[in-house]
Amino acid sequence: MRTDTQAPAAESPASAGPVRTRRKLPRPAPAALYLLGLLAAAALSALTGFSIALTAIYGVVLGTLAVYVAARLVEGRRKATDRLVTCLVWTAFALAMLPLVSLIYTVLDNGLARLDAEFFNSSMLGVVGEGGGAYHAILGTLVITGLTALISVPIGLLTAIYLVEYGTGRLKKAITFLVDVMTGIPSIVVGLFAFALFALFFGPGIRLGIMGAVALSVLMIPVVVRSAEEVLKLVPNELREASYALGVPKWRTILKVVIPTSIGGLATGTTLAIARVVGETAPLLVTTGFVNGTNLDPFSGRMTTLPVFSFYQLTQPGFPPEFGIERAWSAALVLIVLVMALNVLARLISRFFAPTTSR
Amino acid sequence: MTLTSAPPAQPRPKRRPGDRIFAGTATSAGILILLVLAGVAVFLVTEAWPALTAPAADLPDGKSLGSYVAPLVFGTLLAAVIALIVATPLAVAIALFITYYAPRRLAAGLGYVVDLLAAIPSVVYGFWGIAALAPSLVPFYGWAERNLGFIPLFAGPASTTGKTMLTAGLVLAVMILPIISAISREVFSQAPALHREAALALGATRWEMIKMAVLPYGKSGIIGGAMLGLGRALGETLAVALVLSASGGITFNLISSSNPSTIAANIALQFPESSGLTVNVLIASGLALFLITLAVNMLARWVVTRRADFSGAN
């Protein structure tokens, strides 16, 4: 019995003829070939005076070509196309990393020179040429960003709660759509809006810190709403229903069940929204103006913020220009560090509070 | 009699005062957003009105509003289109890299690194554009003028500072890259696993699988992401204001030092020193920008939501 059933199975591979083995490039071959192409490119560019840019351009072309031709010869057309695309995709990613690396290097290179104690504890009041700092601008940024958060976080969260918990029908659809539209408004237009709003009541020469905060709020609210909405939607309905079943009114359910469950996500979203707003320059340029001294009162007089400070120090560095330009770069560095710190903070918050839904 | 004939059909759900207050505040916060957006439009129109109605002779250069705004609109569109042409293929490739090519363990970290590009403030991009990108492109512009000068885009004379329309477009491309790639990435990772595995099981190579199963599924996501990127590029202000040397009128010459400015950059540079009717003219140009980006964004949302209707996800 057994032999009967096994016999044909043993025969069949033989009757199909010799098995065609697919020829394949060994695993490290593509990388090695690519490297070979890079070396050839370095040699080629050395012929006409060595330059890194030329090496990179030749290298990508030659390396890709080497991999493609080798795969074409050994593995056939389809595999070769696959390898070609793989090369292109890797190249694209490397190309995208280039600006990031170059940008961070440039800012560090130029900005570290003036990153001293004086930069942090003196303003530009009465400073001509050397010295001076961004004390007033850093404080201005903190005040205006704080005020912005104070305006937009409650409005944004309440809107998100409305959309998720209460909203129905047309109004909900309209608000969702308009929040999407608001996300896309150019920041300079928002600045003009805040200017137009205040100019209507206080005349065209008006420049106040609060105007900047209003403008930034218009930018920040939709970001808060979007992220809060996503997070609130993640809260499982069973939790809400359990709470209703115990006779808890809806508003207490939201306050005591829904929000505590999603607090980590809400905090992450808010932090990211603040990080986005901190670096905004354009709306502040037209609303808060620019001063050299420290002004902490957003309701009277002009205020300077870090991005605006940095912009003016670069474009109008005064004489001699190198000191202003150094201050501009240091301000840019502080700004990047601030934004990155907020981003990291957001990641940390989401990591520490994440598992609250699946307890 | 009346008591028995009209019993309430159902007990009304009890509305506690707390509920009413809470629902009221939440609803009014939502309505506030409607008002804000309406306010943006209304206040911009109000402040732009004097410029829209003023006779041409009163306007800053004695030109009509149309001939003042036209080069700006052209410059805005040109810079944004360059950015889009450069950024879209790259962003799609990066999205593919992170979703399907990168080593699994690194993918999330690499995605985060690309997102960092989006977090960098635009004024810093402007700094980088001036200090690093523009000078390093000068040799290329010289080469392009000598060898590609027959194409009107590279007619020259090549800028010696590198502050050209092409540089501005490239900076914008770097800025919108993370936006397009984030949306593409999301769509690509949602491509149905069954389709992908079926393609692979039929012996498709990885690229063939992507071509057959992922890209058709993600097409409208890519288009929507690209249009959102376009909207961002149209409104980008300071990077362009810093990088572009704006002195010319409408021209397709990308590498010379006389370029049309963009609406946003022009406002940022002119506004702080303007007064009187010039302010109104600038606000009118801002209104034009508002309308352009509004149209682009609405179109983008429409494309993206259309995909959501089609797809089986959610």
Image (cartoon, coloured by chain):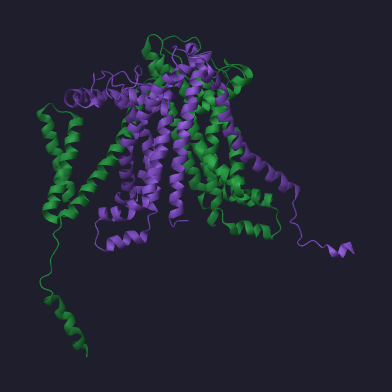
Q: Position of residue B118 (x, y in %)?
A: 41, 36
Q: Residue at x 14, y 34 (%)?
A: A42
Q: Is residue B241 left or right of residue A162?
A: left
Note whether residue A304 is visible. Answer: no
Residue A142 vs residue A245, the one in the foreground = A245
Q: Residue at x 35, y 48 (%)?
A: B107
Marks counted in the figure total 0
Figure colour of chain A:
green
Q: Is residue B207 left or right of residue A323?
A: left
A162, above or below A332, in the image: below
Q: Residue lying farthest right?
A: B1
Q: Quadrant of the N terminus of chain A?
A: bottom left
Q: Quadrant of the C terminus of chain A?
A: bottom right
Chain identity for the colour purple used in the image? B
Q: Residue at x 52, y 48 (%)?
A: A230
Residue A282 vs residue B125, the one in the foreground = A282
Q: Residue at x 26, y 19 (%)?
A: B159
Q: Position of residue A184 (x, y in %)?
A: 48, 36
Q: Position of residue B256 (x, y in %)?
A: 27, 20
Note whether residue B257 is visible. Answer: yes
Q: Position of residue A117 (x, y in %)?
A: 45, 20
A99, above or below B93, in the image: above
Q: Residue lying farthest bottom?
A: A1
